Image: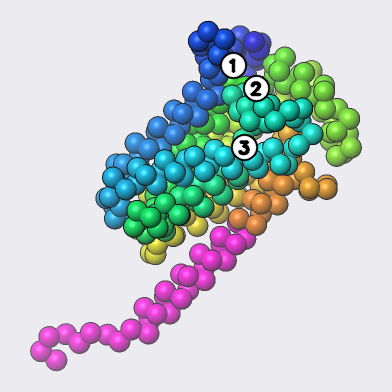
Amino acid sequence: MYTVSFLGLTFELNPVALTIGSFEVYWYGVIIATGFLAAMIYAFRRADEFGIRTDPMIDVILIGTVGAIICARAYYVLTSLNKFSSFAEALDIRDGGIAIYGGLIGAFLCGGLACKWRKIHPLDMFDLASLGFLVGQGVGRWGNFMNQEAFGSNTTLPWGMYSNGTHDYLASVQSELAAQGVTVDPSLPVHPCFLYESIWCMVGFVLIHHLSKHRHFKGETLLQYIIWYGFGRFFIEQVRTDSLFIGSFKISQLVAAACVIIGLAVLITVRVRQRKAEKAQPLTPAKGE
């Protein structure tokens, strides 16, 4: 149970949604599932616009989802092995511990293979899935709020968040943060990074949803998603205090920067080639000439 102060309110927050016997269902999982359902509904409503039949799409989504969950957890575990004392603990995702980049890798790899099996053009599916990811991430980040995780360093902004959960976590990692040159007072409010990312994803969804109605080529929406999400995540990750590191570098920031650079390079290259091809096409003479 957490006592949370956030957005001018103070309230009790229980991360457990319900208990069935000795099994606890966490709000984290409920909210992630809600985000997934919202993304599914959106995908079904727009499948025809992307030239995708819904029956085979269901198979692709199911296979991609399984791959995403496995890879998201594997990515997190492999980059933070010191946090787990047993194999069973490494498998338990009910109270958090999945990495979005691992999930995306798994979704695209497994989903791509499923597209080949179900005879769906992978780039059409990836374009549609990218919009679904923005919906799912925008909703799903509130699961982090229920677990009081994915927050940042101290802030004096009016939307700063404080709870016994943020206090206890920051108090337990003072030495690690100091080694990174970060000073955080556990007794003060922190940046609600989950909120920043949720807003960033929902704004991106509205923007890219509109742009997707005027695709210039297959894969364009996917590239727009990669660039948008990577750009926002790079700056949000800057203030987070629970980042995974390679040496002195935050893994998520490195991946985010690579996503933006590569995504922009590919997007610009394809558009330039398209325009050159359009200019090179001979004009069709009017009838009667």
Identify the residue at horizontal 62%, vertical 27% (top origin).
92
Is 275 placed above or below 8 here?
below
Which element type, helix, strand or loop, lies under badge 2?
loop
Residue 275 among magenta residues: yes
- Could you tell me the amino acid type at mark 2? Gln
Residue 236: image quadrant is top right
Residue 148's tag is 2
Lower position in the chain sequence, tag 3 or tag 2:
3
Residue 85 seen in the figure: yes
Q: Residues within 10 Å of mark 3 (few under 14, many from 20)?
A: many
On residue 15, which mark appears? Answer: 1
Of the 4 image quadrants, the one containing the N terminus is top right
The image quarter containing residue 10 is top right
Left or right of 120, for residue 269: right
**Of the residues tagged 2 and 1, which is closer to the observer?**
1
Residue 85's quadrant in the figure? top right
- CA gap between label 2 and label 1 equals 9 Å
Residue 77 in the image, given as x and y percentages of width and height: 69, 37
Tag 2–tag 1 contact (CB < 8 Å): yes
Please state the extent of the stretch shown in magenta in the rendering. 260-289
Name the spot of residue 89 as percent of width and height, x first.
68, 26
Per the image, label 1 sits on a secondary structure element best described as loop
**Circle 3 sits on which residue?**
73
How far apart are labels 3 and 1 at the CA level? 20 Å
Which circle's residue, 3 or 1, is located before the other in the chain? 1
Identify which amino acid the numbered label 1 is placed on. Pro
Which residue is outermost to the front? 87
